[in-house]
């Protein structure tokens, strides 16, 4: 043993207790004191977690208050496009596309002007 104290290396995270070896100065005997640190560690961890939750809640509230003050709204999808659109198939390549983006000729639909020209030949 080196010096009056001996602290063996143990891992407190696993719940192992740490032994403090205390050597009496007037007596030649060695007294062993054991303290289980898991209860204290759990309390500290719970306290730190609680602080983190409060900080995150505070930041979220501040962010939403700033957005409300500036009048900023959440981005929404394209206005007026809430209804689903019919899909059509290009007669040349077979790709499916929305009817509004297709080119129609008689009862056939095409994905581009080039395919429309190819079909007319």
Image: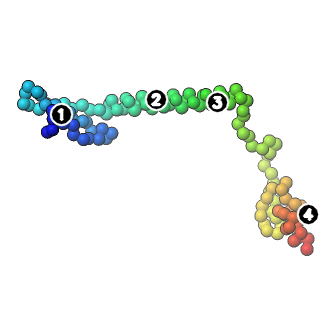
Q: Residue at x 85, y 68 (%)?
A: 115
Residue placed furthest toward the bottom: 121
Left or right for 55, reference 33: right
Tell me whether the residue at label 4 lies in contact with that at label 3, contact meaning CB atoms closer than 8 angstroms: no
| C-alpha span from label 1 to label 4 | 94 Å
Q: Which residue is mark 1?
A: 5
Quadrant for residue 7, please give it.
top left
Badge 2 density bin: few <14, some 14–19, many ≥20, Cα 10 Å = few
Q: Secondary structure at mark 1?
A: strand
Mark 3 / mark 1, whichever is N-terminal: 1
Tell me whether the residue at label 1 lies in contact with that at label 4, contact meaning CB atoms closer than 8 angstroms: no
Where residue 105 sits in the image (x, y, percent)?
A: 91, 63
Number of the label disc, if any, that sits on residue 105: 4
Mark 3 / mark 2, whichever is N-terminal: 2
Q: Which residue is mark 2?
A: 50
| C-alpha span from label 4 to label 3 | 51 Å
Residue placed furthest toward the front: 3
Number of the label disc, if any, that sits on residue 72: none
Badge 3 density bin: few <14, some 14–19, many ≥20, Cα 10 Å = few
Q: Which residue is mark 3?
A: 64
> Which quadrant: the N terminus?
top left
Of the residues tagged 4 and 3, which is closer to the observer? 3
Q: Secondary structure at mark 3?
A: helix
Vertically, is 12 above or below 57?
Answer: below
Q: Residue at x 87, y 60 (%)?
A: 103
Q: Secondary structure at mark 2?
A: helix
> Which quadrant: the C terminus?
bottom right
Where residue 104 sits in the image (x, y, percent)?
A: 89, 61
Mark 4 / mark 3, whichever is N-terminal: 3
Tell me whether the residue at label 3 lies in contact with that at label 2, contact meaning CB atoms closer than 8 angstroms: no
Q: Is residue 21 visible?
A: no
Q: Secondary structure at mark 4?
A: strand
């Amino acid at each position: 043993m080196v010096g009056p104290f001996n602290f063996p290396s143990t891992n407190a995270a696993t719940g192992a207790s740490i032994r403090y070896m205390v050597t009496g100065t007037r007596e030649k005997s060695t007294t062993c004191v054991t303290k289980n640190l898991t209860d204290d560690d759990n309390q500290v961890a719970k306290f730190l977690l609680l602080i983190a939750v409060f900080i995150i809640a505070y930041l979220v509230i501040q962010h939403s208050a700033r957005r409300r003050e500036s009048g900023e709204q959440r981005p929404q999808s394209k206005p007026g496009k809430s209804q689903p659109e019919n899909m059509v198939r290009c007669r040349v390549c077979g790709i499916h596309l929305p009817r509004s983006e297709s080119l129609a000729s008689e009862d056939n639909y095409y994905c581009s002007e080039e395919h429309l020209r190819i079909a007319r030949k």
